[in-house]
Structure formats: C-alpha cells, structure tokens
C-alpha cells in the first residue's frame, strides 16, 4: 500500500506493488538473531562456575579420600600343623524330629494335606 496525493489536496491509500521479499528476509534475520541469543543464554546457564573462583553459594569440595590400606596376605607355613574342625557345634536333631517340625510348619503355613508329605520330605532333607 502506498499513500498518494489525489487531486483536491486529499490523501488516498493506493493498492500497489509491495516489497514482500524484504519483509520475509527481515523476519528470517530477526528469527535467527533470537535463536542465537537464546542459545548463548542457555549455554551460559549450563556452567555457572565459569567465573574465576566459582560461585560463593557452592559448597567447598570434600577432602580427598585416604589412600587404601595395603596388607600382605597371610602366607601358609609348610611346617605348621593343619587345623581340622570336624566336631559339630550342636548335635543334629533326628530325622523324625525334623519331619515333625516340618509338618507343623506346613500346617501353620496353610499347605494342603495332599502336599504336606512332599514339603516335609524336602524340608527335613534340607535342614
């Protein structure tokens, strides 16, 4: 649209040739500038400690861990007598006692009577 002077000292809006391509270029240029500014601000927000000395609100770094303690393993001696510990600490209950205990456990757990025999055998052999 153009403004033109019409005879009689009046202004009129005249439809005419527009320069659309320059408007599109300007819009693309502004969009690209906005994207660049957003990318720069997002990148700087990712590293808040890029200043010398970092931020005053960050906690100090923890102290380094102490070095691991290195100990030599115990070397077996050829002439030392071997220790055998075959004595059980408590005597094992009899098979009948174990079966009775396992049947009681099965009944308390709600195992069906048809499956208690298999459960009690497995339980008694396991213990």
Image: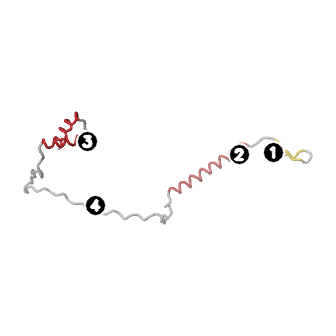
- For disc 4, the neighbor class at 10 Å (few under 14, some 14 to 19, many from 20) is few
Alpha carbons under labels 2 and 1: distance apart: 16 Å
- Of badges 2 and 3, the one in the foreground is 3
| Tag in front: 3 or 1 | 3
- Which residue is at a point 62% across and 48% down the rendered structure image? 32
Q: On the image, numbered disc 1 is attached to which residue?
A: 2
Residue at label 2?
Answer: 23
Residue drawn 81% across and 45% down?
2
> Among all residues in the image, which is located at the extreme right?
8
Question: Which marked residue is nearer to the observer: mark 4 or mark 2?
Answer: 4
- Display coloring: secondary structure
Say few, some or many: other residues with alpha carbon within 10 Å of mark 2 (under 14 / 14 to 19 / 20 or more): few
Give percent across and percent down for residue 23: 71, 45
User: Could you tell me if the residues under marks 1 and 4 are in contact, i.e. CB atoms within 8 Å?
Assistant: no
Q: Which residue is mark 3?
A: 109
**111 or 3, which lies in front?**
111
The kind of secondary structure element at disc 3 is helix
Looking at the picture, how far across and down is residue 123, in whole percent?
Answer: 19, 41
N-term mark: 2 or 3: 2
Nearest to N terminus: mark 1 or mark 4: 1
Q: CA distance from mark 1 to mark 4?
A: 84 Å
- Could you tell whether 10 is left or right of 29 in the image? right
Instruction: Tell me which residue sits at (26%, 39%) in the image.
Output: 110
In the rendered image, which quarter is residue 65 located in? bottom left
Question: Which one is earlier in the sequence, the residue at label 3 or at label 1?
Answer: 1
Determine which residue is flagged by label 4: 68
Q: Is residue 58 above or below residue 39?
A: below
Indicate which disc, 2 or 1, sits on the residue closer to the N terminus: 1
């Amino acid at each position: 649209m153009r403004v033109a002077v019409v005879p009689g000292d009046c202004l009129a809006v005249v439809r005419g040739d527009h320069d659309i391509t320059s408007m599109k270029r300007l819009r693309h240029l502004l969009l690209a500038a906005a994207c660049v500014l957003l990318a720069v601000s997002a990148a700087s927000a990712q590293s808040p400690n890029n200043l010398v000395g970092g931020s005053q609100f960050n906690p100090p770094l923890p102290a380094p861990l102490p070095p691991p303690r290195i100990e030599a393993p115990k070397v077996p001696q050829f002439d030392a007598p071997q220790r055998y510990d075959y004595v059980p600490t408590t005597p094992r209950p009899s098979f009948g006692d174990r079966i009775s205990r396992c049947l009681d456990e099965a009944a308390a757990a709600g195992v069906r009577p048809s499956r208690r025999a298999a459960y009690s055998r497995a339980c008694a052999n396991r213990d």
